[in-house]
Amino acid sequence: EDKVVQSPLSLVVHEGDTVTLNCSYEVTNFRSLLWYKQEKKAPTFLFMLTSSGIEKKSGRLSSILDKKELFSILNITATQTGDSAIYLCAVDLYNTDKLIFGTGTRLQVFP
Amino acid sequence: EPEVTQTPSHQVTQMGQEVILRCVPISNHLYFYWYRQILGQKVEFLVSFYNNEISEKSEIFDDQFSVERPDGSNFTLKIRSTKLEDSAMYFCASSDLVAQYGYTFGSGTRLTVV
């Protein structure tokens, strides 16, 4: 059965800290891995990763994929209270339309 | 920035009633999806829709569910006879042909069945 596991489930940090969120997967026919940020409602797209070892960066957020070890990390540097959200990892497969989501990591950033 | 719009944002319905959840996907997207998230659980795939027909559906998407694209812009999810366990956040999403920019999700409809 295809599976996506995120860790930690929850993280509490202070503003300015750097955090690393993990996503591991066991799937067949891997196509890409996606990271989303979910605040109040809609998951908003952060990154799509298809190739190993190529870092994607957007401001203080960055992410990288390791297709050999089957995981990805999402880094957030100099965290701000606005980074507080649930971060979702999802895997897109060939031969199916569905995304397979992890349970998410709840990040809380306190001033 | 283009977005996926969902209405209503919150719907409360009695068990056994029919509900229709509405979505307006991004205009040049070709693939449309419904996902749901039961409180405290993972986001789960329900159904995908392409070229005016269901492309794929999950085991959750039983005969109580149906989808339709009644005109060029709306995409609807109908639940014929709601059950308590249908209470969840329902997300609509759309993507272009190769999902090169990921899948764009709407802000969701929170369905509460009482």
Image (spheres, coloured by chain):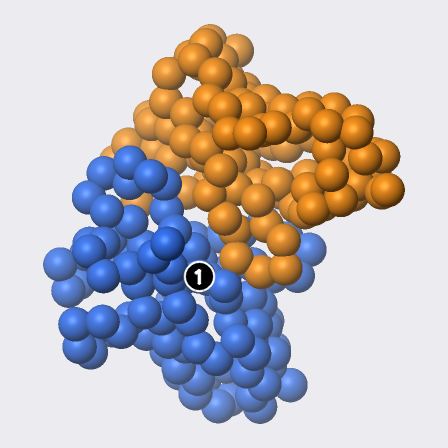
Chain colours: A orange, B blue
Residue B103 to residue B51: above or below:
above
Q: Position of residue A86 (x, y in %)?
A: 66, 46
Label 1: few (<14), some (14–19) or many (≥20) C-alpha neighbours in 10 Å: many
The residue drawn where x is 38% and y is 28% is A32
Using the rendered view, name the quadrant where residue A60 is placed: top right
Q: Quadrant of the C terminus of chain A?
A: top right
Residue B111 vs residue A100: left or right? Answer: right
Q: Position of residue A75 (x, y in %)?
A: 63, 24
The residue drawn where x is 58% and y is 68% is B88
The residue type indicated by label 1 comes to Gly
Q: Position of residue B77 (x, y in %)?
A: 36, 73
The count of marks equals 1
- Frontmost residue, A69 versus A76: A76
Q: Chain of mark 1?
A: B
Residue B67 vs residue B79: left or right? Answer: left
Residue A51 to residue B61: above or below:
above
Residue A55 to residue B43: above or below:
above
Most extreme residue toward the left is B51
The residue drawn where x is 36% and y is 71% is B23
Q: Which residue is disc 1 drawn over?
A: B106
The residue drawn where x is 52% and y is 51% is A43
Residue A55 vs residue A20: left or right? Answer: left
* Residue B77 in view in this figure: no
Residue B50 to residue B85: above or below:
above
Residue A58 vs residue B32: left or right? Answer: right
